[in-house]
Image (cartoon, rainbow, N blue to C red):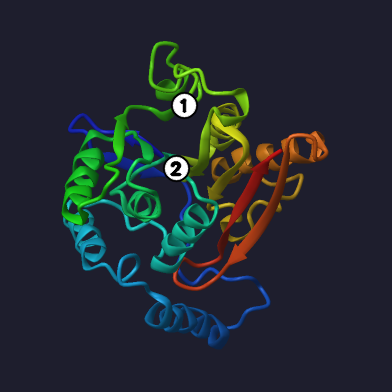
Amino acid sequence: MSYNLRPDGSVEYIGKKIPRAALPPDVGVAQGRSAEATDAYLESKLSHPEYAADPSLARGQERAKDAGMPEIAVSAMQGQMLSVIAKGMGAEKVLEIGTLAGYSTSFLAKALPSHGQIDTIEFSPVHAKVSQQNFLDTDLFPFPTVHVGAALDVLRDPSGAFASPPGTEQGLPLEKRGYDLVFIDADKENYFEYWIEALRLTRKGGVIILDNAVRGGRIVSEENDQPDIDVTGLRKVYDWVEQDAGKTVLMSGIQTVGAKAWDGFAIAVKL
């Protein structure tokens, strides 16, 4: 999916969307219902009071819906998975590409120590405003810094916040310069460019997570298929990883079904 910015600052989403019922061919209707029911069961059992069960996060989702924003954020359990990864690795500096209403941002910020840093980039000023309202409601600390603009322009600005990895100006050793974790969940056609920027800004041993990494199986395209902007960027990432032959990253892909249909994550460690 990609988007255009309207004059009022809102976003028009274009491209293909994965219907909620989209599942692998070998998963029948009954199993599909079971996948969503399983998501609901896990959410009811595993939601932590300070994370997925925090009522301010649900209010933020309602605020986003009232603002007419698309319901394309991660699920509650996927958000809490981001918290688990960030907290488990002891992340202190996080970058998110694609804020939307700040739902995933909040899960990441909650997992950081009070002296941590979280930067998030959002294309739409309207979305950025809603996300900041949500951050205030959730009382996040550290408070996320929202950088508004087209992500590639923001990331590549030679005088901007991302001109060099965090810690460079402070003179930290090379191995300590960079974000501990980068989460990419923005327009899919630019995923490869975001991937390259994430590699530049992530420290060695840091983690890069790409959301929507399966797209209903459309990443497996045939030679005669028409170009699909939702997956061409992802396929470039996977081609890059294949050609890199393990020199730069260790990556795995995870397929998901359930509340967010058939999709998945790609997770990499920078070596």
Tell which residue pokes out farthest to the bottom in this image: 30
Image point 22% across, 54% down: which residue?
Answer: 64
Query: Residue sitting at 59 percent across and 52 percent down?
Result: 213
Secondary structure type for disc 2: loop
- The quarter holding residue 3 reads top left
Three-letter amino acid code at disc 2? Answer: Glu
Q: Nearer the viewer, residue 34 or 199?
A: 199
Q: Nearer the viewer, residue 179 or 14?
A: 179
Location of residue 50 (image quadrant): bottom left
Q: Which residue is mark 1?
A: 166
Element marked by disc 1: loop
| Of callouts 1 and 2, the N-terminal one | 2
182 or 152: which is nearer to us?
182
Q: Amino acid at mark 1?
A: Pro
State the residue at coordinates (46%, 25%).
152
Residue 106 lies, in percent from the top left, at 32, 52
- The CA span between labels 1 and 2 is 11 Å
Q: Is residue 47 left or right of residue 21?
A: left
Residue 174 numbered mark, or none: none
Q: Are marks 1 and 2 in contact (CB under 8 Å)?
A: no
Q: Which residue is mark 2?
A: 92
62 left or right, relative to 44: left
Q: How many marks?
A: 2
